[in-house]
Every structure is written in C-alpha cells, then in structure tokens.
Image (spheres, rainbow, N blue to C red):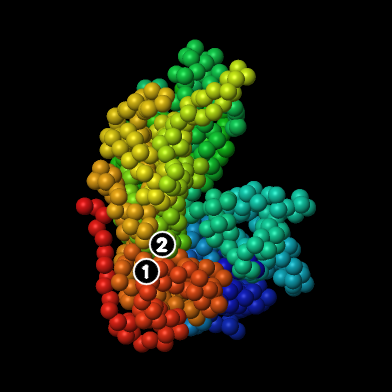
C-alpha cells in the first residue's frame, strides 16, 4: 500500500472529495452543490493569474491579492480551493499559516463561505516536506489550472475511463507540461490514486529509488511509477505492508533526503577576474579547464590525471587536487543539489543545480566546463556574515567544496527551511531540512541534536555513554552520516579485549614476497579513513568506535593520544615510520556501556580529549523518547513507557537502567513486550539483585503495569556518574 501513514485519513478523504466534486463534476470542495470547478471559473482565474501574471516586485501573496480585485465570488472561491488543494501536497507549512492564507482569500468574497471542519482537519498534515518548492506556488497553481482546463475539455466518458485506470489518469496528467510544478503533479497522482502512486512528490527521488532497486525489476515496466509499484511488491515480503521508501533502512539504500547535497563553487577570482555576474545572468556555474579536452563523467582517475599532465606538463602527484575538484564537479554534484558562490563583496548567491556537465572548448577562460544552475537569490543575495559558524568553518580556498553536511543551513538562506509569511501573520512552520527529518527519525528533540553536533564539531571527538539499550550506537551512526553527508565517508569499528594498535592503526601482516613468506606493514581502518580525509580536505569523515571502553584504549591508540589533541601536528608511526596526522576533517564518535564498570579504567588523558554525552533514561537527549515513539507508532502500548519509568525508579543504579531500544520495534505487540522483558531485561536485573528475591518481585511485569505510581516501588536511588572529570 503506497499511502503514507503520516499523511492522515483527513487528507486522503479530501483527495477523494476532490475526485467526486471537482473531477467528476463542476462542484466545490468547501460548498458541495456550488459550481466552482467549472470551465468559466477556471478560465477567469487563469486569465487573472497566468495570462496577466504580475512579474513585478512583491510577494506571491501580494500579487494574488491584486489579481483577485474585482473578481466574482466563484473565481475567488476557486482560488481558495486551489490553494487548499495544493496545501494537501505539503507538510512543511504550519497549520495556522495554511488556515490563515485560505481564509484571507475567502474573506474577499461578497458572501464568504467557510471551510468545513472535516477539511480543517487537513491543515496540520500533508503528503511531503517540499523544502524550496514552497516558493514555487505560482508554477504549481498554474499547472493545476492548465490541467483542470484540459480535463474539463474531455468528454464525460473519457474522464470516467481515466478515473477508472491509474495508468490512463497518469497519461492525462503528464500530457500537461510541468514547468517546475512537480509537487502538484506528483501530489495529484497520489491524492487521486493513493494506493497506486507513491507519496513522493520529487521525480528525482523516484528515479533514485528505481536506480537503487533496479535488480527488483524485470524491465517490462513502462514508467517510473509502475517500476515503483513493482519494487514495492517485492519489498513487501521483508517490510510492513504500509512501509515508506523514506523509512531509514530503505532510505539508506537509495540515499534520500530533503535537501540533498550542497556545494560551494568559487568564481570570484577565475583567471584574475570575477565571473560570477556571468553565472548569474546566464544561469550556470563553471570551473577552470585543467585539460584541453572534456573530462566525461566516469573518466578513470589515472586517465584524468594523464589528460591534465598532457596539458600542464605537471607530474601526476602535483595534479591530485585538480583531479579531486574535477571529480566533484563532473561526477559527485547531482541535479537538484544546492550550489552557492561568494563574490568579492562577500555576497552569497544560492541556486539549485539543474543540468549535467557540459563542455565548450571555445568558451572564455574559466567557463569551458559548466553546469546549469537555477539561481534563486540573484537579486537579493545573502551576506557571508549571514552564514552560521558551522558553514563558515567549511569555506576553505578550494574551487569546489562539499557542503552537504550543512545543506539545511544553505536551504535556509533562500527560505528553504521556513516559508514566507503573509502580512496577516500565521504561525511559523517546523523546520523541513535534513536535520528535522533526522530528529523525527530518532524521535529526539532537534535542539538536543544540534547541541550534540556542536559538541562533536567543536572537540572533533565525543563519546556517548550510558546503560545498554539507550540507542548510543544507532544515534552515533545516524549523526555520523548526517555530518559526513555520504555513507562512504563513515567507518564503524568495534573495540574488544583482543583489539590492538596493529588492528586499528597499522601493523605487520603475513604476505608472500617473491614466492617466499614474509611480512608487510598493513594499514588499519584509522589510517585508511585518515588518508581519504586528507584527499578530500573540505569533506567531513567520521569514525565511529563502538564499545570503545572494551579495548585497552591506551595501547590501541598509542601515539594517537597526542594527535587527538593536536590535529595539525604529526607523529611517527611505530611500524611504517611514516609521519602521520589526524586530519581536522576526521571526526571520532565513541560509544560505551556503563553497566559493566569498564568505564572506570579510562585514564584522564582520554577523558580530556573527548566530550562526553550521557545517554541515560530520564535525562536529555533521550528522556521520554520511548513514550513519544509509542504515541506515534503504537499508541495502544503507551503503558509500556509507564512500566519502564516505574522500573527505572526502583533500580538502585542508573547504569543498569532499562533503555528504550528494547521496545523500538515496528512489530511490537504485547507478546513481544513480554518477550523482551522476560528474556532481555529481567536477566540483567536478576544479576544485579542476585540473592535478593524480595527485590526481584518488584519487577514483575504484571505488577508494574497495574501500579498507580512509581512511589509504590520502594527505595530509589538515581545514581549518576560524571565522566568529564
């Protein structure tokens, strides 16, 4: 089933109301019986809104007000219902903002109608977070009007045939030119046929999913929507019937996200001149041509360096940076990614990449290798001082810099995180960038995530500590991928009693040399990731060390103790003798369980070099997380959160407190709750209270469930630990 669980029944009911009232007849969403979606009203609104479009200064809403001056009530109500229907597609804008906007339009009628309560219930919901597409209302509403005009020109039989066949309806929808209206196009398909078309309003996301799961297809599907249907049928064997392609396990496969990648491309001093004005006027971005020939996407690394060598005469090792930058521009920048550039006066221009790499051998210097960009604030640029500190810190003097880890901050510069508010006010909408999506996925407060990210970025290394089951490793990996912007720049290692420096940094490995057994120095995961970080100094790499306290940390880290604190210094490695440093763009996140007390062996040197983030039930950042997750996903099991709170109040040691991870399970039911309690939680409690059966009786699941308050549990002692000292 393609319906989105977050969309809500009210939105789907409104979609079917649109089918019956507006597609099958000329009726009305707000006042059934009135002929609102009729050809005369559509033609009048189209003439005012599209044919006589106001291209002057002013906001979209200012212009709409002027366009509706003197309009008959039918046209005004059509405008309000069009805006309402468009809002069904987006989940970014706040409910109050949507309500106020629609009501303000309706109030322009001589005899205003009101929005029925069942439609009012739609305002807090929508199909998808659409980010910057909120600024494309004119395109979306214009397309809706063109489609409805084409629809009304069909015979009744043709309309019924289309409404009875999703494929036929899709063909009709796609016969009307989109013109940057994909949100409304894809949203209409889903609202009319919610069980046939995915709740995805981005064509690029649809294509990315199909590409990632191409091995699930037999090649006979005629279009991307039928390909998605085929993929869903295959994946249904492994996931819930109502799964979403944005569920974390699936999104990790196809790389989905709200804002996507972000890049800085420098043009303020190309061949001694500022070529940014040319970029803005002609709608592109470019980089200098190191070779006299085109570097096609996918060109092998050595072949690219040889091309540069033939042009410049420089040896390959002097051309590595040029190769890295060219690879980013040609291969890694994707259509839809954010692009920013900064001119000599520190004005910041933001755009969206809209074209594949092009090559013009006759172009002016610095403009041969180019890509099309839709510049969004050419007339009202931001200023360098507007950039958050975490963005400014990434602005190194490279030609092309990966800013994907701060793409939500880039989006915010052009309203990509909050929509413009009309004059009459309205509530602010929630953030819609990747960080908001991450917070929702982790069921954590966005402010807490920002705080943790700031700690990691400031110290460059942090340790998450607390009892088992509090999500330390899961959160560490998700934050690592967020910071890196690309899963390939994240590495996970797990320490254990036999893990050594030779496994982690470098050591001798047996090999065959000239047919004889011997040894060679082999790099461990730390050296491998550090080398990758050195090659891409503007990108962020993250090493996640799980169970960091289970190894002999002093022996495993060796000279790295020094390098963790002095990132610009180099130390001589024990086996290779190489001079080695930890690049500043390599971050380290460790996790440690405190239940086994091995944390006590951490020495002061390690404590001084890491920030420590507690993960204890009842304390930020995971306080009340289980209750929030249950309310959203398993409301009939909210009592489990009460049981866990009562049990944790009774435990005499916070280091064995019961974490939420035992119950974060999409298949959770009462049987699984009891299974986790009896076979995962009670054994730990029994070990702690060995020989004290009277204490164990207090943790019987049935008894905990029926207790009215935690005070009935007996003695409590919320023992805590301070690791930072």
Observer-nearest of 31 and 508: 508
User: In the image, what residue occupies the spot 45% across and 80% down?
Assistant: 701
At numbered mark 2, what does the secondary structure look like: helix, strand or loop? loop
At numbered mark 1, what does the secondary structure look like: helix, strand or loop? helix
**Coordinates of residue 451 in the picture (x, y in percent):** 31, 55
User: In the image, what residue occupies the spot 27% across and 46% down?
Assistant: 603
In which quarter of the view is residue 694 placed?
bottom left
The residue pinned by badge 2 equals 468
**Coordinates of residue 589 in the picture (x, y in percent):** 38, 48
The residue pinned by badge 1 equals 688
Q: Evaluate whether residue 144 shows in this view.
A: no
Farthest-out residue, front: 691
Which of the labelled discs sits on residue 290, or is there none? none
- Does residue 313 sit above or below 480 in this rendering? above
- Say whether disc 1 or disc 2 marks the residue closer to the N-terminus: 2
User: In the image, what residue occupies the spot 32% across and 28% down?
Assistant: 571
């Amino acid at each position: 089933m393609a319906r989105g669980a977050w969309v809500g029944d009210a939105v789907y009911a409104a979609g079917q109301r649109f089918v019956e009232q507006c597609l099958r007849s000329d009726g009305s969403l707000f006042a059934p019986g009135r002929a609102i979606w009729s050809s005369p009203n559509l033609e009048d609104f189209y003439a005012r809104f599209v044919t006589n479009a106001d291209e002057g200064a002013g906001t979209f809403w200012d212009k709409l007000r002027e366009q509706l001056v003197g309009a008959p009530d039918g046209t005004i109500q059509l405008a309000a219902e069009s805006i309402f229907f468009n809002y069904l597609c987006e989940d970014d804008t706040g409910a109050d903002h949507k309500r106020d906007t629609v009501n303000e339009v309706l109030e322009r009628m001589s005899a205003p109608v009101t929005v029925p309560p069942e439609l009012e219930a739609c305002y807090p919901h929508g199909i998808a977070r659409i980010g910057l597409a909120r600024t494309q209302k004119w395109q979306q509403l214009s397309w809706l009007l063109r489609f409805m005009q084409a629809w009304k020109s069909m015979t009744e039989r043709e309309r019924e045939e289309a409404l009875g066949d999703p494929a036929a309806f899709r063909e009709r929808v796609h016969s009307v030119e989109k013109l940057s209206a994909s949100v409304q196009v894809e949203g209409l398909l889903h609202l009319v046929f919610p069980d046939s078309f995915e709740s995805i309003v981005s064509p690029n996301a649809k294509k990315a999913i199909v590409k990632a799961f191409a091995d699930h297809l037999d090649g006979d599907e005629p279009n991307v929507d039928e390909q998605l249907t085929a993929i869903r049928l295959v994946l249904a064997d492994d996931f819930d019937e109502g799964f979403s392609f944005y569920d974390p396990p699936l999104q990790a496969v196809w790389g989905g996200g709200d804002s996507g990648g972000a890049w800085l491309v420098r043009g303020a001093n190309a061949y001694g001149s500022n070529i940014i004005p040319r970029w803005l006027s002609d709608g592109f971005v470019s980089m200098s041509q190191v070779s006299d020939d085109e570097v096609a996407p996918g060109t092998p690394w050595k072949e690219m360096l040889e091309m540069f060598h033939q042009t410049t005469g420089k040896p390959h090792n002097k051309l590595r940076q040029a190769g890295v930058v060219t690879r980013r521009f040609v291969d890694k920048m994707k259509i839809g990614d954010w692009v920013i550039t900064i001119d000599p006066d520190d004005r910041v221009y933001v755009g969206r990449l809209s074209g594949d790499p092009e090559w013009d051998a006759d172009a002016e210097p610095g403009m041969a290798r180019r890509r099309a960009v839709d510049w969004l604030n050419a007339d009202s640029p931001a200023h360098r001082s507007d950039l958050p500190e975490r963005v400014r810190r990434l602005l190194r003097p490279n030609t092309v810099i990966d800013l994907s880890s701060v793409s939500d901050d880039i989006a915010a510069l052009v309203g990509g995180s909050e929509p413009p508010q009309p004059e009459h006010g309205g509530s602010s909408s929630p953030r819609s960038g990747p960080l908001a999506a991450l917070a929702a996925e982790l069921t954590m407060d966005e402010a807490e995530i920002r705080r943790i990210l700031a700690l990691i970025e400031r110290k460059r290394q942090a340790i998450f500590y607390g009892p088992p089951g509090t999500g330390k490793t899961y959160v560490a990996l998700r934050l690592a991928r967020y910071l890196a912007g690309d899963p390939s720049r994240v590495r996970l290692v797990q320490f254990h009693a036999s893990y050594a420096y030779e496994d982690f940094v470098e050591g001798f490995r047996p090999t065959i040399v000239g047919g004889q057994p011997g040894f060679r120095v082999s790099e461990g995961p730390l050296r491998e990731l550090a080398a990758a970080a050195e090659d891409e100094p503007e990108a962020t790499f993250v090493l996640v060390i799980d169970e960091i306290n289970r190894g002999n940390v002093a022996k495993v880290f060796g000279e790295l103790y020094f390098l963790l604190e002095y990132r610009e210094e180099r130390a001589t490695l024990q086996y290779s003798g190489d001079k080695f440093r930890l690049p500043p763009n390599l971050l380290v996140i460790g996790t440690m369980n405190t239940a086994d007390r091995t944390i006590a062996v951490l020495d002061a040197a390690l404590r001084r070099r890491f920030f420590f983030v507690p993960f204890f039930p009842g304390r930020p950042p995971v306080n009340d997380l289980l209750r929030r997750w249950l309310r959203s996903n398993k409301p009939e099991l909210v009592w489990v959160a009460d049981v866990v709170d009562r049990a944790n109040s009774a435990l005499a040691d916070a280091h064995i407190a019961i974490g939420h991870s035992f119950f974060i399970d999409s298949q959770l039911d009462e049987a699984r709750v009891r299974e986790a309690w009896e076979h995962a939680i009670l054994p730990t409690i029994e070990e702690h209270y060995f020989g004290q059966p009277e204490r164990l009786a207090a943790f019987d699941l049935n008894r905990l469930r029926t207790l009215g308050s935690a005070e009935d549990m007996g003695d409590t002692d919320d023992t805590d630990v301070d690791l930072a000292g």
